[in-house]
Every structure is written in structure tokens, then in C-alpha cells.
């Protein structure tokens, strides 16, 4: 295996499931061509990403605009065939600005970086959980993924509006949605913690565990949560050769 692949992985560009080696090389060279030096104003964010996820994604494009953002959103990650681009709200150009008095632009940026790094994994079941793990606030890490999308937020608001204006019977819809979101939150926290537990037993290094979870597909996380992944053919793929060389070269199966 080319040792350059390990360097690319540490920059946040890694082989995707079922991606041929030639396709990976072409994609990595295209993405890393836009890498730039880390500016002083973003040094904390990139230092935090390195310590939290073992990654230095200086190639991810960043723009400031309010286009397409809901009123409560400080930023988003736009995905297309060529890659991912992070967009932050225009007012966050000010280094001292806070979103709703709570979140700094650095907090929002590191959250959106998780989405940018996982853009090719084609699975969003765990993405909000991993993105909220970047928060320095315990309550946001735990409760942040309660809703996963703008659609879920608007559906909840609509159920509250219908219950208030039309009939209290609509409150059953609100209660049902809240119950579903809460059960989903607890279950996925449990599954993710089980995957981390088995990885921790195998690797013994918390930073490497987080680094692997960031790069794992939904299927891989679910298999690790039941300690079955190392028995699959996926373990011998280029993708997992890179991961083993990067994080678990000393681990014993």
C-alpha cells in the first residue's frame, strides 16, 4: 500500500466503501489540490479537529452567505458530485459573533466539517451524532441530535401549530413525534457507545476510536456495535488497510 494514503487519511481524505484504488487516488488529488495554509483566525478550530478527530482538513472550502439557511441555522454543508463546501452565516464573518448568543463560528465550523468529511459515505444515520460530538457543551453533545433535519423541525412546529389553532387532538401527533425522537436518540447513543466500546477494547486509544468512528459508514458502525466487523470481507479492503496502518497497526485481533 502506498504510504501516501496514510498522509491523505490524516488530512481527512480516505477510501470510501467499494471505491477502487484508482478512483480514490483521483478523488484525493482533486480535493487536496485546494488545500491551503491554516490562518491564525482558524488555528483553534483546526487544532481542535486534530485533537478530537485526528484530522487536518485544510482542503474544505469555506464561504459566508445566508443563502438557503433556516433562521436557526448558523451554517450548513453543501454536497455535490465534486465534494463538499461549508457555508457559514454572513454575520459570522465577525470573529466575535455568536449564533443565538450560544455558538461561536468556530463551534459551527467544526460541526460542519464532520458533514464535509463524511460526504461520500452515503449514510446519515450517525452523522448528526458525530457532528454534535464536537461540541464543548455536554447538553449539546447529548441532546443535539434529538432532531436530525430541517424537515423534522418544521414537522414538529407544524404539529404544535395545529394543536394550538385547530384542535387539541393534534397534540397526540406532537407527543408521538417527541416520543419517537427521544427513543431514537437513546437507542442511537447506545449503539454508538457500543461500537466505541469494542473499538476501545481493541485499540486502547480514545483519539483513534473517535477518528475511526468519524470515517466509518453506518453499516460499519452497526457491525462494530455487535463486535462482528472483523469477521467480514470488508476488513481486508484498501479502506481498512489504510485505517489499520493509520490507527491500529499495533492492535491484536
Image (cartoon, helix red, strand yellow):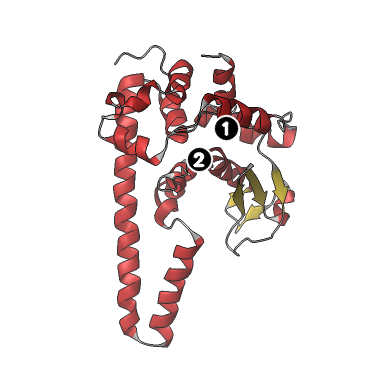
Count of picture labels: 2
Q: Residue at x 47, y 33 (%)?
A: 215
Q: Residues within 10 Å of mark 1 (few under 14, many from 20)?
A: some
Please tell me which residue lies in front, 164 or 130.
130
Task: Say whether residue 18 is visible.
Answer: yes
Residue at the farthest bottom position: 166
Quadrant of res 24: top right
Q: Quadrant of the image for the C terminus? A: top left
Please tell me in which quadrant of the rendered image residue 101 appears.
bottom right
Question: Depth check: 128 or 116 in front?
Answer: 116
Mark 2 Cα-neighbour bin, 10 Å: few <14, some 14–19, many ≥20:
many
Is residue 171 or residue 3 the one in the foreground?
A: 3
Residue 141 location (% of width, % of height)? 44, 46
Q: Are marks 2 and 1 in contact (CB under 8 Å)?
A: yes
Residue 192 x %, y %: 34, 39
In the image, 147 versus 9, the foreground residue is 9
Name the residue beneath numbered marker 2. Answer: 134
- Which residue corresponds to the image point at 69% horizontal and 44% vertical from the top-left? 62
> Is 164 above or below relative to 45?
below
Horizontal side of 203 relative to 121 (left or right) equals left
| Label annotation for residue 70 | none
Residue for point 31% across, 13% down: 252
Could you say where residue 9 lies in the image, as x and y percent from the top left? 55, 25
Left or right, residue 185 beside residue 75: left
Q: Is residue 137 visible?
A: no
Q: Quick one: label 2 or label 1, which is nearer the N terminus?
A: 1
Distance (Cα) linking label 2 and label 1: 9 Å
- Residue at the location (27% across, 25% down)? 231
Q: Circle 2 sits in a helix, a strand or a loop, which is it?
A: loop
- Label 1 element class: helix
Location of residue 245 in the rendering, given as x and y in whole percent from the top left corner: 46, 16
Name the residue tied to disc 1. 48
Amino acid at each position: 500500500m502506498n504510504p501516501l494514503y496514510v498522509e491523505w487519511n490524516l488530512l481527512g481524505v480516505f477510501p470510501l466503501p467499494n471505491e477502487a484504488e484508482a478512483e480514490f487516488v483521483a478523488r484525493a488529488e482533486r480535493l487536496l489540490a485546494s488545500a491551503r495554509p491554516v490562518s491564525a483566525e482558524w488555528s483553534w478550530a483546526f487544532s481542535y479537529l486534530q485533537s478530537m478527530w485526528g484530522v487536518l482538513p485544510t482542503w474544505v472550502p469555506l464561504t459566508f452567505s445566508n443563502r438557503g439557511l433556516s433562521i436557526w441555522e448558523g451554517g450548513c454543508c453543501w454536497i455535490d458530485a465534486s465534494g463538499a463546501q461549508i457555508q457559514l452565516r454572513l454575520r459570522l464573518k465577525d470573529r466575535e459573533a455568536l449564533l443565538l448568543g450560544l455558538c461561536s463560528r468556530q463551534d459551527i465550523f467544526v460541526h460542519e466539517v464532520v458533514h464535509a468529511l463524511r460526504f461520500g459515505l452515503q449514510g446519515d444515520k450517525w452523522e448528526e451524532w458525530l457532528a454534535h460530538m464536537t461540541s464543548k457543551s455536554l447538553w449539546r453533545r447529548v441532546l443535539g441530535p434529538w432532531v436530525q433535519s430541517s424537515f423534522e423541525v418544521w414537522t414538529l412546529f407544524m404539529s404544535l401549530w395545529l394543536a394550538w389553532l385547530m384542535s387539541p387532538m393534534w397534540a397526540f401527533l406532537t407527543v408521538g413525534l417527541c416520543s419517537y425522537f427521544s427513543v431514537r436518540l437513546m437507542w442511537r447513543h447506545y449503539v454508538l457507545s457500543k461500537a466505541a466500546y469494542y473499538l476501545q477494547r481493541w485499540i486502547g486509544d480514545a483519539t483513534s476510536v473517535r477518528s475511526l468512528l468519524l470515517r466509518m459508514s453506518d453499516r460499519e458502525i452497526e457491525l462494530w456495535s455487535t463486535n462482528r466487523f472483523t469477521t467480514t470481507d470488508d476488513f481486508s479492503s484498501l479502506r481498512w488497510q489504510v485505517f489499520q496502518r493509520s490507527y491500529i497497526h499495533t492492535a491484536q485481533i
